[in-house]
Image: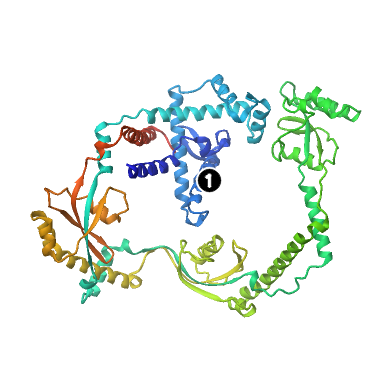
Amino acid sequence: MESFRTVIKGWLGKVLLVLFLTPLALVGIEGYFSGSNKADVAKSVNGQDISNKELESATKNYKDQYLSLVKGDESLLNLPVIQQKALDALVARSLLLQQAEKLGISLSDVQLEQMLAQQPSFQENGKFSQQLYENYLRSVGMTNQGLIASLRQDHALKMISTTLMDYALVSQLDLQQLANLQTEQRTLHLASIKLDDYKKGVTASSQEITDYYNKHKNEFKQVASVDVDYVVLSPALLPATNLAVTDADLQQAYKAFVEKQQKDVKREVKHILITTDARDDAAAQKLANEVYAKIQAGMTFADAAAQFSDDPGSKTQGGLVATYAPGVFSTDFDNAVNALKNGEISKPVKTQYGYHIIEANSPMVKLPSFESEKVRLTAEVEKAKLANLFSDTVNSLNEMVVGSDSLDAVAQEVKGARVESVKGVTLTTENPYLSDLNVKAKLFNDDVKNGDRNASSNIQLANGDTIWIKVRDYHPAGIKPLAQATAEVKAKVVEEKAYKAAQAKIASILADFKTQPAAQVVAKSQVTFEDAGTYARSQGLKRAIERAAFSIPAPGKEGMWSATTAKLPNELVIVAVSNVNTSIASELPPEQMHELSKLYQQFRGQQILEDYTEYLKSKAKIK
């Protein structure tokens, strides 16, 4: 049962990863309300446009998911396939939303507002916080009406999807067959026939090689690869000269440290907001100027905020914007904050929210003394000097390498640096240097594909080292030409002949298993069988052996074996089954059968949702 759970859950996990049940995560919240013109349309679904911006956002979402699976190596991704996957999901989402609208599936404004009020992230001390809610709206650049509309679409999509998935009918017969298949156990006996003896004296003629190649060309595909020379330079290879740290160096480093500490202090920002919600722009600007004049005349900023500010979250706090961060309001707001000296108050600044009068203060910073920082600064300066020496050396060597079109200059100038050569490097080759993303981008770029064989300029590696590369030859992806694949084809022809010879040799053994007791067949076969044990599906057998073992019928009676063969590299395996236990499914406890039923219903529901989406697509006008 555990193996069944592993297989099904793994499959469902992959499906749900790309399912369009969570559109906010798929396209990003801005995707719902991004305007588009006809020139910016990626696809039109029944007259409803999917913008290129939405497609870019969805593609990025998928790309990020797949990047996590390949440890961030973008070169291993098939970007056109990912983009098509994202587009298909957006089309399906659009179709389901349109159908939900036709069926009247929706939540009212009151229901959605109640849902928002109950969100923990918008609550403070167990109650809805208008300030937290407005801060969130500002952070995502949305209005209250926009968020409501967005959530309405999200829930309509989930309602129509879950209606189809949660009520999928599950056949008890199908359920029982699934349980039987997954829990069935077979007792196996294996005999290995090595092919080396059958290959002795076997040859392959030129015609046989040509015929096999023409018939099985797809077996000789190759991915793109390069033959490359490279040389790596690391800071450790450089002589430690001129790296002494002077007192002047330390004083300069301490000064830079102090300036950075002062610059990095988070400023306390206050504002008085005059909105245009209840007045026009001219009236709002006039009032903002009047409030600014009152403050200049002696009114405290806190009193002005309490009396005039339209920001309910900050007006009672002296105008303090508790969650201020760059980008919350606008670039103009941030520029005004950065331009203010401590305690200085800005003239009214206009943003999309209205007019702001801003005050900014920086708290005093307690700085460590020069003496207490001396050890750390010494190490920091030494590191910086080594980095400068390394950078200067790289620049100098780079001119030599590019100018001479040779990597030898690095090896000649730096003791310990060596030119290395590697053949057949692919995008998946594991190499401490050539697997670096920046290096692979250079090895397989269009210039190399079009014949560029010049030494590269320096490429910085992720670990800080520098590498130069020179591609000697580029082998494009595709079918290997026969001349290049001859040795490989010949080996396959010889192995195929050996397989056939071995199969002919054991044909009588397989025939005997059908009519004679297993013990009798084994005794006279001169083949050694090993008791492999009892297995269910997906329990660690080699795929070819598992496929063979579970493809043959159960033995006809006690003492008989069912037998077939499985092909492995340079080996033919006789796979025999002595017993098949199908009673385990009937012994499963109710809770496991219930879990199985839920998993199967999810599977069926997913199929129904996909079929329904395909039906809508067949009736839709998509262009």
Q: Which residue is farthest bottom?
A: 412
Q: Is residue 481 above or below residue 595?
A: below
Residue 253 place in picture, x, y as percent: 79, 60
Give whichever of 54, 620 is nearer the camera.
54
Other residues around mark 1 within 10 Å, as few (<14) / some (14–19) / many (≥20) = some
Q: Does dot 1 land on a helix, a strand or a loop?
A: helix
Residue highlighted by disc 1: 60
Residue 249 picture quarter: bottom right
Residue 217 place in picture, x, y as percent: 30, 63
**Residue at x-position 50% and y-position 46%:** 65
Give whichever of 466, 267 is nearer the camera.
267
Q: Is residue 167 above or below residue 195?
A: above
Q: Is residue 511 visible?
A: no
Q: Is residue 519 above or below residue 110?
A: below
Q: Is residue 70 visible?
A: yes
Give whichever of 204, 508 is nearer the camera.
508
Q: Looking at the picture, which amino acid does disc 1 mark?
A: Lys
